[in-house]
């Protein structure tokens, strides 16, 4: 019996709820990070800080998130994922609230550290939940829907955040996130069912041993290396994107929300389709296409001078399409790497690696980019070349991961005539809670 096609899978009402819940959750976490970029043009003069200090504020979140992921990795598979998610989400809301009342740059730095300590773990828990509930052959679709959180943060979050920031100061943008996050937390508490199948698969009760076992496996190390490069782009370019748009591209600050709005709407429309396409054409193939597109657009964008707003919007739409292709496909592949017993720890460490790499990237970007006395940023084009180089290297590092995932999926395929009995958490998993095999069209070419 052949594995079912991605199109044949019909999500249950509860699975649809999980997808929507994780998307809204990611919306708040992503918005908390991304809002630092558009607020940069407001926040730097308000707090009288330099581009270097602003880069450190972005890095503070990333480094603390990386540390939290490592500390949480040993325990990530020891508890119900719902409880883990609620604990860290509550801390994230607290940290964001502290950002919303920060009276000074040092206080804001401390608040960003608190937010990162909790918010940095949420993404890994969400990824583990997706891998627990959804089979590999439809995981691209799931990732595509969840990744609309990035687009949603642009369509709704960033324009509203900029409006609030321009009208009532940058503090109000963080307080908006607190209000939305509190509602999401209530839904998680009431509606999400316990997720515990991974606990039964544990072979050790010692969290340190569990962490060492995870980080010492070569196949996992390969994934961590790829993640290091994948994190470079966003952390290098995004923190200074609004300042670059205003000072170099000459987009008025009052019109900047329209850039984010138009880009976000297009990303929301494309996200689910690109996720489904990654399941159909192959996740690695989709990753390569997105990387090549991204390299070209990044180099063009970072070398632009004064540009009409229509041109900036068009470039951003194509760039975010490429980013979505890379994110959906790479995360779907990464989710299939760990065994059930290691899934939470792997996701936590992988997320920590991304945060550490991003923190280093943001710090380096803050040192490279210089704001001249008359406004424009200098050396932004150098960041574009660095990011493009990282994209080329990532294509090579993702290939062995793609091969391992395909071999693992083939080995776990049910024998013909015996059916694909579900096991563990959710449909589409074979005995032992491992994801069912991907169809032959998923990334085999």
Image (tube, rainbow, N blue to C red):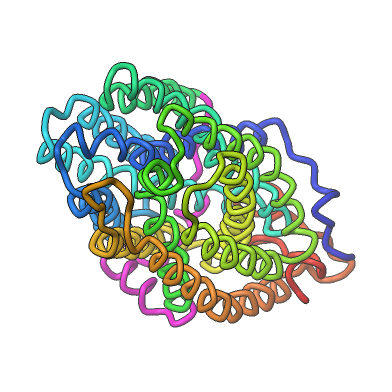
For the residue pair 389 and 282, the one nearer the viewer reads as 389
Is 213 situated above or below 244? below
At 47% across and 78% down in the image, what residue appears? 222
Task: Give the quadrant of the C terminus.
Answer: bottom right
The answer to whether residue 21 is visible is no
Residue at 74% of width from left, 58% of height from top? 279
Quarter that holds the N terminus: bottom right
Quarter of the image where one finds residue 294: bottom right
Please provide percent x and percent y for residue 186: 43, 22
| Residue 355, visible in the rendered structure | yes
Which x, y percent locates residue 410? 73, 74
Q: Is residue 143 left or right of residue 344?
A: right
Residue drawn at 18 percent across, 24 percent down: 101
Observer-nearest of 423 and 368: 368
Q: Is residue 372 above or below residue 23?
A: below
**Foreground pick, 60 / 77:** 60
Q: Which segment is the magenta one?
A: 191-219
- Quarter of the rendering containing residue 151: top right
| Residue lying furthest top | 168
> Is residue 310 within the magenta segment?
no
Residue 329 location, x and y as percent?
63, 61
């Amino acid at each position: 019996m052949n594995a079912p096609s991605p199109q044949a899978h019909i999500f249950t009402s509860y699975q649809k709820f999980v997808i929507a819940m994780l998307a809204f959750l990611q919306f708040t976490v992503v918005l908390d990070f991304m809002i630092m970029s558009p607020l940069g043009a407001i926040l730097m003069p308000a707090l009288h800080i330099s581009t270097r200090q602003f880069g450190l504020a972005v890095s503070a979140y990333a480094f603390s998130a990386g540390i939290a992921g490592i500390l949480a990795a040993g325990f990530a598979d020891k508890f119900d994922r719902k409880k883990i998610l609620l604990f860290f989400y509550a801390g994230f809301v607290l940290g964001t609230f502290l950002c919303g009342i920060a009276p000074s740059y040092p206080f804001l730095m401390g608040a960003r550290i608190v937010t990162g300590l909790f918010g940095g773990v949420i993404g890994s828990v969400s990824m583990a939940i997706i891998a627990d509930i959804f089979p590999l052959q439809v995981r691209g679709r799931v990732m595509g829907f969840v990744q609309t959180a990035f687009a949603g943060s642009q369509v709704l979050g960033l324009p509203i955040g900029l409006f609030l920031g321009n009208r009532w100061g940058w503090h109000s943008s963080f307080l908006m996130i607190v209000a939305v996050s509190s509602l999401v937390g209530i839904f998680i508490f009431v509606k999400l069912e316990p997720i515990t199948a991974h606990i039964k698969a544990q072979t050790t009760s010692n969290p340190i041993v569990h962490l060492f076992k995870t980080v010492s496996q070569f196949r996992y190390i390969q994934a961590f290396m790829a993640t290091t490069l994948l994190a470079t782009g966003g952390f290098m370019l995004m923190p200074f994107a609004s300042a670059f748009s205003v000072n170099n591209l000459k987009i008025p600050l009052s019109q900047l929300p329209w850039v984010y709005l138009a880009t976000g709407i297009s990303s929301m429309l494309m996200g689910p389709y690109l996720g489904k396409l990654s399941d159909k054409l192959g996740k690695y193939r989709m990753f390569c296409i997105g990387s090549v597109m991204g390299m070209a657009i990044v180099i063009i964008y970072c070398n632009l001078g004064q540009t009409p707003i229509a041109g900036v919007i068009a470039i951003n739409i194509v760039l975010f399409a490429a980013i979505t292709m890379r994110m959906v496909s790479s995360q779907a592949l990464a989710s299939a790497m760990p065994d059930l017993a290691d899934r939470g720890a792997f996701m936590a460490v992988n997320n920590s690696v991304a945060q550490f790499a991003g923190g280093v990237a943001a710090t380096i970007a803050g040192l490279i980019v210089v704001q001249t006395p008359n406004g424009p940023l200098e050396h932004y084009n150098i960041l574009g070349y660095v990011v493009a180089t990282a994209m080329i290297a990532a294509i090579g590092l993702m290939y062995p991961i793609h091969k391992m995932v395909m071999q693992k999926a083939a080995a776990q395929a049910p024998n013909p005539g015996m059916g694909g009995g579900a096991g563990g958490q959710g449909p589409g998993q074979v005995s032992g809670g491992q994801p069912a095999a991907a169809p032959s069209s998923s990334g085999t070419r």
